Amino acid sequence: MTPLRELLEASAALHRHLCPRQVLGVRMGLLAGELFGLALPQSDKRLLAIIETDGCVIDGIAAATHCTVGRRTMRIEDYGKVAATFVDIHAEQAVRIVPRPEARMLAGRYTPGARNRWNAQLLGYQLMPAEELFTVQTVRLKTPIEKLVSQPSRRAVCEICGEEIINQREVTRGGRVLCRACAGQTYYRPATPESDRSMPVSITPTGSLGVLMS
């Protein structure tokens, strides 16, 4: 596996600085690789990461594993927790890794000369044994792995809004093929009744996006 220092540098390059949660993310990814016996960062798409928050930890996990949203090997389920479930797609096994609550205090034992708690955590998380830093739990996914991964080349068209649906994310309601939004699973709504329509978009002379108002 790539040495910890190189992975931390890669994470810092993504994030423009290095922070304790990035260190946690890198070490979570490395631990998953050890548990599954996988060489990381991966060059294929065997490892899937399901992360329970956004922010710094994601950059650490991405640097250590090469799991990314763009490669469809990373998913975000925002529970506001610095935790992640790693899935070996080939073996159909999953483990959930979460930092121990006492890890913040234990980090100080490994960095007695640290200037403050933040620096103690930044350095201590790099030095602590994994068993003191993390709790590991074997889990089963509620959604089958093949459904999570889906078929990237598959396309459908929603019978209500007419928009294209990719990656096998369509749903069926009453025999009709619908997108999740039209099936009632939307995360948005029109701001006003008047805005419940498509707005044509143009490119302004400066190259930025503009909306044509009629």
Image (spheres, rainbow, N blue to C red):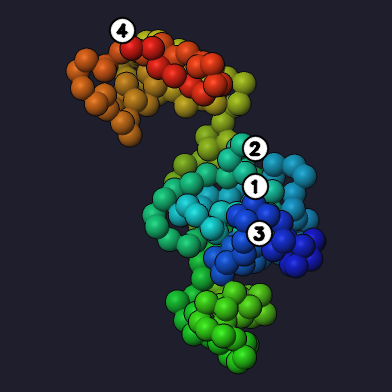
Q: Where does label 4 land, which residue?
A: 214
Q: Nearer the viewer, residue 141 or 85?
A: 85
Sequence-earlier tag: 3 or 1:
3
Towards the viewer: 91 or 122: 122
Tell me how far mark 4 sits from mark 3, CA to CA: 46 Å
Mark 2 in CB contact with mark 1 (< 8 angstroms): yes
Do the residues under discs 3 and 1 have CB atoms within 8 angstroms? no
**Label 1, on which residue?**
67
Specify the farthest residue to the left. Answer: 193
Question: Whole-percent x and y of residue 162?
Answer: 40, 10
Q: How many marks?
A: 4
Label whose residue precedes the other's in the sequence (4 or 3):
3
Confirm whether residue 138 shows in the render.
no
Question: Which of the 4 image quarters holds residue 69?
Answer: top right
**Compared to 140, does 97 lie above or below?**
below
Distance in Å between CA atoms under marks 2 and 3: 20 Å
Q: Which mark is residue 162?
A: none
Residue at horizontal 56%, vertical 21%?
A: 207
Amino acid of disc 2? Arg
Secondary structure of residue under mark 2: loop
Residue shown at 74%/53% (left/top)?
Answer: 41
